[in-house]
Amino acid sequence: MDAARPPTARSLGDSPEEAFRRLFRDLACICGFDGTLHWVSPNWTEVLGHLPSDPLSRRYLTYIHPEDREATLTAIRGAASSLRLLDHLENRVVTPDGSYRWLQWSHEVDHEAETIYAVARDITERKHTELRLAASEARYRLLADHSTDAITVSSSEGAFTYVSPSGREIFGWEPEQLIGKDIYTFIHADDVEGLRASLSAMLSDPGVVTLVARFRRADDSYRWLESTGQQILDPDTGELTAVIGNTRDITERQRVQADLLRQAVTDPLTGVANRILLMDRIRGALLRLDRAPGLVAVVMLDLDRFKGVNDTLGHDAGDAVLIEAARRLQSVCRVSDSVARLGGDEFVVLAEGLSTVEDVDGLARRLGGVLREPFHVDRAGDGRAHSRVVTASIGIAMTGWHAHRPEDLMRGADLALYRAKSGGRDRHELFDADLEASALLRSGTEHMLRRALADQHVLLRFQPVVRITDQKIMGTEALVRIIDGSGAEVLPGEFLYVAEHTGLIRELDAWVMRRALSYQSGFAKIDPTLSISVKVSTRNLGDQWFAEHLTTSLADSGVPASAVMLEMTERVLMQTTQSALAGLRRLRKLGVRVGVDDFGTGYASLAWLREFPLDFLKIDRDFVQQASTGGASVAILQAIVDLARALSLTVITEGIENPHQLAVVQEVGCDYGQGRLFSQPLSAGDYELLLSSRQGHRPVVARDAPQPPSPRSRLSESNRRPIHYE
């Protein structure tokens, strides 16, 4: 075992002092009071690169970095005079390659021998780290001092301990005014709770946390600030010691976001709520019924005579009326009520916390009354104020009839509004059980119509139009039908209103036009002089797409535009719009003929006819039936025909059912007619048979007219000519 023991200093023959010197791990040296080195430890070679004999008898200062010599000399002198200045001295010592190593010293002194015994530790790596940290801190402070964002350090208690110079602009205080102050003393009262919650979350999440709050400035104004905070934890205890924050002013950004949000939920013209915000508020009102029982009412208003303002005074005046109408509605509502504009001239008032139906009725009366007061607006160009009265039709729906959703209340109010309009306008109606039943019927009709369109259960019937003088067939009117689930035909009166109010009318009109022209190309092979009439919805009349669709359909079918007659309802005359007039002009420019169907049912002024680019006039069947009794009714019928003649309009009479009625319309001078006297509506195949049988132009009499097939056979006949979507 002794042979295996490594040799020690004494086993090599060294004295105890020599063995001690050889065992130094730190650098050691002995020097005189004059700084001359008498001995250095062997590891000077390992650490500094000097052989132990090199520095002997040389002044210690010759090895010291020039910048450190003064401090080193002072420390040696202090050691000679019993001062401990040499202890913890740090200086740089040169190596043979010219580089320097950092040393930290401690010492003992023998005054009798005027000798200093010193020990040094190599701290080069530590000093380099400290210098890098110092440089990094300097750069950080430079960035902090010149950053446009405010850099802050806060204590764990929330007090500022450092605020960069840019904090002057961000916080509105001098940085030194904030030092030591609690951050919460500057936060808006409404934001304190949220800020505390965010800071508490920071304790459980070591990541960066973003804080947003309003900060009080020295002038007592508030600015929105956004700060990203990073926590600093004690490495030993893990406790929060500080929070470093980077703060910027986001007041302008918050303003822009608030403006965008406001624009998203308000009407840009009047400033009241839009549909999105209204539906949200209705939803909230229904939820509050659980805590505060009462009535929630949706009051829908439509301005009755608003169109006349746009037409006579211009759209700027119309906008002024809408703005004033919104203001008036708000003036008679409670603070808890909401006024919204759905678009156009339609407004909605949401009222909650009502007790009785009488409260709702009173609100409707106030709303209607404030709108009856004249509106004074300017017309562009004349500089004069014009007075206009704009009344409102009002529909009301309220909780208590199984309305559990905002959509139910809106739908009920809309149906009640429609009844108010139909009842004469300038009145209000309440949604009730009858309207609910109508709504269910309408819903069933919509479902039936959608299924018919999807399953191609739509077909056309054709009723001939004859010349009154000789009863020659001159053309036909295409009449649309749909097939219900039982296979029976459903007439337009049962589904056209639903089609118009659900948007399905566009698809339906497009199909009818394309299909009618496809059939007409076949009819023309029997008689090229024949024409075909097709009804056009008021909604589609003013749309550019319809003119484009008609152009394409004419080209695809090869039917000349002159053979097509488009019929619009008299309602177009009563609700003339610039888009409708433009639509009429577009259609006539294509070469088709345009006329009014069922004239006399809408009570339109006859003088209005001259304002429209029309070609023909269809007199409603009621006039024919009344005229057949004689008296004043014949005179009225004659007046309509004479006016049409004066306006160069062709006159077609509907509903001729017997020879006496035929004689009357012939006497007053009607040009063409149609009715069951000549033929009932026919399938395409039966109409072709009728045309073929009349090649000799014999008068069409009722007894010769083929009877329409049963609904089941109709469906079978339609299958012989498959119906396709176009």
Image (cartoon, rainbow, N blue to C red):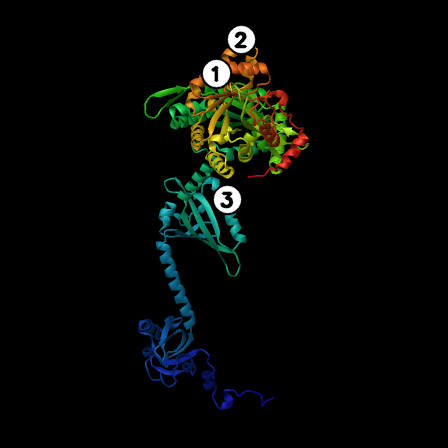
Q: Is residue 507 visible?
A: no
- The residue under label 2 is which amino acid type? Gly
Label disc, if present, on residue 229 of the rendered structure:
none
Question: Around disc 3, counting alpha carbons within 10 Å, would you say few (fewer than 14), some (14 to 19), or many (20 or more)?
Answer: some
Determine the CA span between mark 1 and mark 3: 76 Å
Q: Which residue is mark 2?
A: 631
Q: Is residue 220 above or below residue 35?
A: above
Q: Is residue 247 visible?
A: yes
The reply, left or right, for residue 399 in relation to residue 604 is: right
Nearest-to-viewer mark from 2 and 3: 2
Q: Residue 684 location, x and y as percent?
A: 60, 31
Tell me the SS state at disc 3.
helix
Residue at 33% in and 74% down: 65
- Picture coordinates of residue 564 (x, y %)? 49, 30
Residue 257 percent location from the top left of the image? 44, 42
Q: Amino acid at mark 3?
A: Gly
Compute the Cα span from label 2 to label 1. Answer: 15 Å
Could you tell me the amino acid type at mark 1?
Ile
Q: In front: 642, or 574?
A: 642
For the N terminus, the image quarter is: bottom right
Name of the residue lying farthest toward the front? 696
For the C terminus, the image quarter is top right
Tell me, yes or no, whether the two marked residues, 2 and 1, touch with CB atoms within 8 Å. Answer: no
Depicted 651 relative to depicted 718: above or below: above
**Sequence-first tag of 1 and 3:** 3
Q: Earlier in the sequence, mark 2 or mark 3?
A: 3
* Circle 1: element type: helix
Please give the residue where the numbered disc 3 appears in the rendered image.
194
Q: How far across and how far down the image is residue 601, in percent?
A: 52, 19
Q: Which mark is residue 640?
A: 1
